[in-house]
Amino acid sequence: MTLSLRTVRTPVVSTPDRRRSAGPARTDGWWPWAFVAPLFLGVCVFYLWPILQTVYFSFTKFGVFGGQTWIGAANWARLVQDPDFYRAILNTLIYSAIVLLGIPVAVFLASLINRPGLRFASLYRVLFFLPYIAMPVAISLVWRMMFNGDFGIINYALSLVGIDGPHWLSTPGLALISVSLVGFWGSFGLAILILGAGLKNIPVELYEAAELDGATPWRRFRSVTVPLLSPSVFFVTIITIIGSFQLFDALYAMLGPNNPVMPATQSLVFYFYENGFIRNDKGFAAAIALAILVIIGIVTVIQFRLQKRWVNYD
Amino acid sequence: MTSPAVRMSGSRRAHGRGSEAKRYGSHLFAHIVLVLGGFAMALPFLWQIIMSLSSNAEVTSVPPTFFPRELRFDNYLAVFDVMPFFSQLGVSIWITVIRVVVQIILCTFAGYAFARMRFRGRGLMLALVLAILMVPSQVYLLSQYQIVQNLGLLDTVAGIVAPGLFSAFGTFLMRQFFLGLPVELEEAARLDGANPFQIFWKIMLPLTGPAVSALAILVVLFSWNELLWPLVVSTRSDAAPLSVGLAALAGVPTVNYPVLMAASVLTMAPILILFIILQRRVIEGLAFTGIK
């Protein structure tokens, strides 16, 4: 656990290699190259080279029959003027925000599941994990049925309390909310797992001491659990945001790629897919891809700045 | 470092039930919340199965038909008429198996070298591999598509699996795992004159079980469920994996809802069944990767 939180706090690359100093100086000859080469060559061909190529692509226009023409910063100029781009950023942020609302709930659920001596705890854990295991496309199609404006059970449930449910998936705005609720629904399994591990690392003695001082259960939660769990919460926040920024499958499956509400609802990744592979404008899509990288970078930097205010590492 | 999930039950339970009962009172409240929450998690899956066994009229009726008048298992047979299910199942199985096997081999070797071997350029190569972890997949997707297209591998299993054979995350995971093993094991073998490959093969490899199974679980989940990349490189429906096939089926207006639900059950079922059989291992494995 401590290791992971260190990893979050400091850049992965600079993690000190504690084993290095152990043992006498030696050389492993050419063995290391044989061990690393297959992976490293693949990484070069399929990941490192493509990153450079994408930067190049973003300054080109793809011809209909292949080949690229250099067009300078035209794709970038178009991108920063495209209202759809800002709409996609906003939609992605809204989706992330709604999914993030699941974290406090997950803290609560994790503290319940991890009560000592709770029966059926592993059954509960499995149930909350189901959405994580399920194929996003397949389960999103079920939600599509459930959100159906005419015969979906969500509107049926609303009708029982006298609410005339809307057409969720064909109303701009509501479509995004629907997709976000599915993201929220699916966010608990992994969060409970990570937070549960964090809870187990809180020494029981602290709770006992707080109890001796007459702290109420709520006070114990507020003053012991919350600060000591904050590194795990931070870790969950980071992976939730990174995951949310990849929103694609649920959107694609719940709304369908040709849904008229898609332009108003699309995420950054869908916007990338649509331009790169439906409109076949790969140069422009390359600019979008790099913009996604920059936006995730900015959001992550903000996260790490803000963590000083609320994450407790002592 | 053992997975925290393994250690879970130890420390607190040792304090005795009496003081616990006092501290936590009754678990009734916890059970109520967790049962309601668990039901919310399971509901879509139950509803999916009910819809898959109903008639189209029952699925679209208002109020909903909670219990179909007769269970229509023929919806499941109809799936095989509306999509090339077995070809797509084959593609899904192939891409998953190939990725698991190749990734484990490559990541174990490379992870070991990055953790324990000395060679020039190690730091730089490791930094380059880890840098990929921070780059969203869209950034290399266009170029990967071009490579696969130029190799003539669109619509092939080879084309779908190619980029996923090499994993920065898996390498990082295995490296972290090897860093946590004691060096003494290798030193003793080295003094006995074993070469680096023998040390790796005979001493270290047998210890990698937890890390390898954790990696395998993640790769299976990712590979089976992934949509964007296979969607982009498969143009023919019989060469696509199930995720793409199902997404395409949803866009066919003539396919009725119960058949679509039956198809989505069949598509998810292999992984869900595997999860329910191996639940402990899967959860521990994911704890291992998420927490390390």
Image (cartoon, coloured by chain):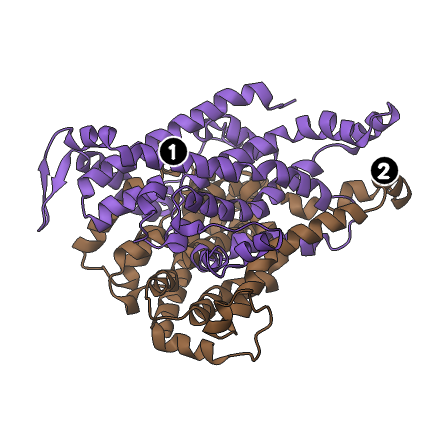
Chain colours: A purple, B brown
Residue A87 makes an appearance in the image: yes
Numbered label attached to residue A297: none
Q: Quadrant of residue B81?
A: bottom left
Q: Quadrant of residue B275?
A: bottom right
Residue B25 lies left or right of residue A254; in this view the side is right
What residue would you read off at disc 1?
A90
What residue would you read off at disc 2?
B23
Which quadrant does the C terminus of chain B fall into?
top right
Answer above or below: position of A301 versus B73: above
Q: Which SS class for mark 2? A: helix
Residue A9's x, y, as percent?
Answer: 52, 26
Residue B91's x, y, as percent?
Answer: 35, 66
Residue A55's x, y, as percent?
Answer: 22, 34
The chain to which mark 2 is attached is B
Residue B128 makes an appearance in the image: no
Q: Nearer the viewer, residue A172 or B46?
A: A172
Name the residue type under label 2.
Arg
Q: Which SS class for mark 1? A: helix
Answer above or below: position of A261 versus A253: above
Q: Quadrant of residue B120?
A: top left
The chain to which mark 1 is attached is A
Crowding at mark 1 (Cα within 10 Å: few <14, some 14-19, many 20+): some
Inter-mark Cα distance, 1 to 2: 45 Å
In the image as oriented, which residue stretches furthest toward the right?
B18
